[in-house]
Amino acid sequence: MELPGQTGTNCRGIIDEVVTLAGTRLHPRNLPEEGQTDMSVRITLLFLLLTLTLIGAARQAPAPKRKPIPPKTVALTFDDAVKTHLTVVAPLLKQLGFRATFFITQKWMEDQAYFLTWDEVARIHRLGFEIGNHSWTHSDFGKAENGAKLGAELELVEKELAKVGVPKPVSFAWRRNAFGPEALEQLRRRGYVVARRGMQPDVPYGAIQVGPALQVKKHHPLLIPTTGDAYPAWTFEHFKKVLLSAKPDEIIVLQFHGVPDEKHPWVNTPPAAFREYMTYLKQNGYRTLALRDLWQYYDSARLPDDPLLKARCCAK
Ligand SMILES: [Zn+2]
């Protein structure tokens, strides 16, 4: 993965080549015989002028463009470390050859009947899925006083993941979709490159509506919106409406919780419905990605100046 500040560039190579050529031209063994001097000096000066112009152009050349987004691209995300992520979701996604991100929080882990243990999180990682950070306490990080504590919480999750052999995450999911500038700064400091928010503030929490599809020129990678937040009242028709909402060059981002989610029924997805959604994606040629995969579609030298970077959203 190409990380921020590591933009590939060919400028250096071009400059080196031109400088080498100029050096060869001016080498003593290449200097002209007497009588040819005037013309040769002119040619050399012209060559130097051309060289400097090329160097200038190379320096001003735009950074490499981001990768084009193929149509029917969908990011799949699963929050809260629910046990059914291992027993229902991961096996089905593996069977379908899908990529996805599971966002882990310690908040409910003591309830081992319904939530994952760290060892089970590691099993999901070994199946090939991305493990993302969803904070230790699952607090409202939209609030300034909590935002400053996010760094320490991210680290607690990272340490537990390291103990079971899961690499440090680069993806984060905002709890209850609330975000604020203090927490954003903590994400940057700890090297997170992508973070998913909810449909808010574009669409109110709990509404059966379609959220924004990701536009990489508009939405900052640490504030990637949710296009479809799977509530129990979702219908198959609504699911298709979410998918069809993406225009060319946009990405659908889906947010699920447990399948089923007995402890948090307001975000439950029934397994039969989930199977229907995933089968539809497979049969209709959708490409499913983990959240970290979305970074490749950003032009890292020109991240969007998203007005939400300075905003505080959705805190209750
Ligand atoms: Zn959550």
Image: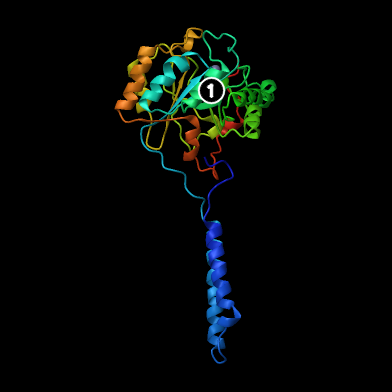
Q: Nearer the viewer, residue 231 or 245?
A: 231
Residue at figure coordinates x 67%, y 27% from the top left? 151
Q: Residue 102, position in %: x, y?
A: 50, 23
Q: Residue 191, position in %: x, y?
A: 61, 34
Res 212 → quadrant:
top left
Residue 22 in the image: above or below residue 213? below
Count of marks placed on residues: 1
Q: Quadrant of the C terminus?
A: top right
Q: Residue 58, position in %: x, y?
A: 53, 60
Q: Residue 210, position in %: x, y?
A: 41, 22
Q: Where ligand 1 lies, by image quadrant?
A: top right
Single out the residue that lies furthest toward the bottom: 35
Residue 70 in the image: above or below residue 256? below
Residue at figure coordinates x 51%, y 25% from the top left? 125
Residue at figure coordinates x 58%, y 73% from the top left? 23
Q: Which residue is mark 1?
A: 122
